Image (spheres, rainbow, N blue to C red):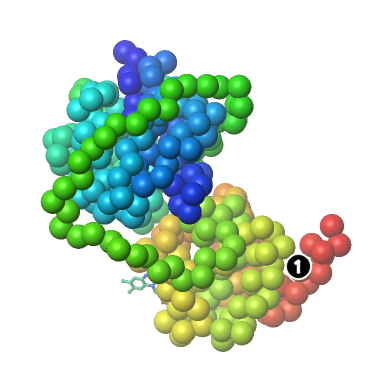
Amino acid sequence: MSKKVLVLGEAREGALRNVSFEAIAAAKTISGGGEIVGLLFGDSVQSLGEEMIKFGADRVITVEHPHLKHYTSDGFSQAFMAVYEQENPEAIVFGHTALGKDLSPKIASKLASGLISDVTAIEGEGDDAVFIRPIYSGKAFEKVKSKEGLLFITVRPNNIASLEKDDSRSGDVSSISVDITNLRSVISEVVRKSTEGVDLSEAKVVVAGGRGVKSADGFAPLEELANLLGGAVGASRGACDADYCDYSLQIGQTGKVVTPDLYIAAGISGAIQHMAGMSNSKVIVAINKDPEANIFKVADYGIVGDLFEVIPMMIEEIKKI
Ligand code: FAD
């Protein structure tokens, strides 16, 4: 059976996040040829609709309201339910982002539907689709098949390849008006920490430092390497607890989950809680003085050595390319 699929796009600072396009690709796989309807909520998102269409959506519905400028679960769930009632879809796809993780259980509960969260791959297509998701902090994967009824999934960023952008695609971008009322909280302003560089959760390359980096200044060579590779800097909780860097960089069970193409772990021992956030990276390079360090068990390439010697050598070689 073909399915109409609603895909929630996510915008940040006037641009769509990549996970929006990955969610469209997942929607195509499960739709069985059905219609893909992109959704955008915000105070000024109309102009982003065409981008979703170029990446595979058939049409886009926007809901614009001053109260949707910043995400609140109340505001976004009101906007979503209004579109849901209008469209009556057979499937829903969100990104497994901070927003998606917060909103999806609320919507699933309102719709009394199931929710297959944190999908990292899809086997098969249409009604035969089987969803693969990590369990036990990434130590195992389970395969889940949806029963009949509404299919609702969230997709982990950086795991499902988005479709090629096709500039020749066109489709309708329409807006519906929703009265966003009775909000329990209204966000008047968001003060961001400086967010220079690449978003850690979507970065293709992550250079992460641990307690072995020894100081805040010790992160400088890691930053230089990350910049050269077009990537982002991350950290273990050990490094954050030691005040070498901000907790927003923490990767792991209680930090961010990342799945870059390349993860370079420098001075990180490889505690199970850290590995929960990075072990699904495509290629892992570990640099550690201790040949017995646990991180080498998940590394594709292990370098036993002092990170303050190894990283400058890497930088020097990359600069030659
Ligand atoms: P360490 O374990 O101290 O390792 C430092 C490593 O650096 C060592 O292997 C050492 O050989 C190496 N080293 C030292 N100097 C050098 C050098 N010059 N060159 C190369 N290598 C060097 N941790 C996380 O990371 N993320 C989480 O989300 C997280 N959540 C947690 C949740 C709970 C409930 C608990 C209990 C713990 C959690 N932890 C988490 C903490 C985790 O258990 C570890 O304590 C932490 O990951 C250790 O950080 P580390 O590897 O940087 O430090």
Q: Residue at x 56, y 84 (%)?
A: 216
Whether residue 138 is visible here, answered yes or no, is: yes
Mark 1 — residue?
314
Q: Position of residue 302 (x, y in %)?
A: 64, 64
Quadrant in which the C terminus appears: bottom right
Q: Residues within 10 Å of mark 1 (few under 14, many from 20)?
A: few
- Residue furthest out toward the top: 1
Whether residue 107 is visible here, answered yes or no, is: no
Say which amino acid is labelled 1: Met
Q: Nearer the viewer, residue 116 or 45?
A: 45
Q: Position of residue 218 (x, y in %)?
A: 62, 82
- Residue furthest out toward the right: 320
Q: Please determine whether, in this image, residue 246 is positioned above or below residue 260.
A: below
Q: Please determine whether, in this image, residue 41 is positioned above or below residue 220.
A: above
Q: Residue at x 42, y 42 (%)?
A: 45
Q: Please determine whether, in this image, residue 238 is positioned above or below residue 264.
A: below
Q: Nearer the viewer, residue 219 or 164?
A: 164
Q: Residue at x 23, y 48 (%)?
A: 75
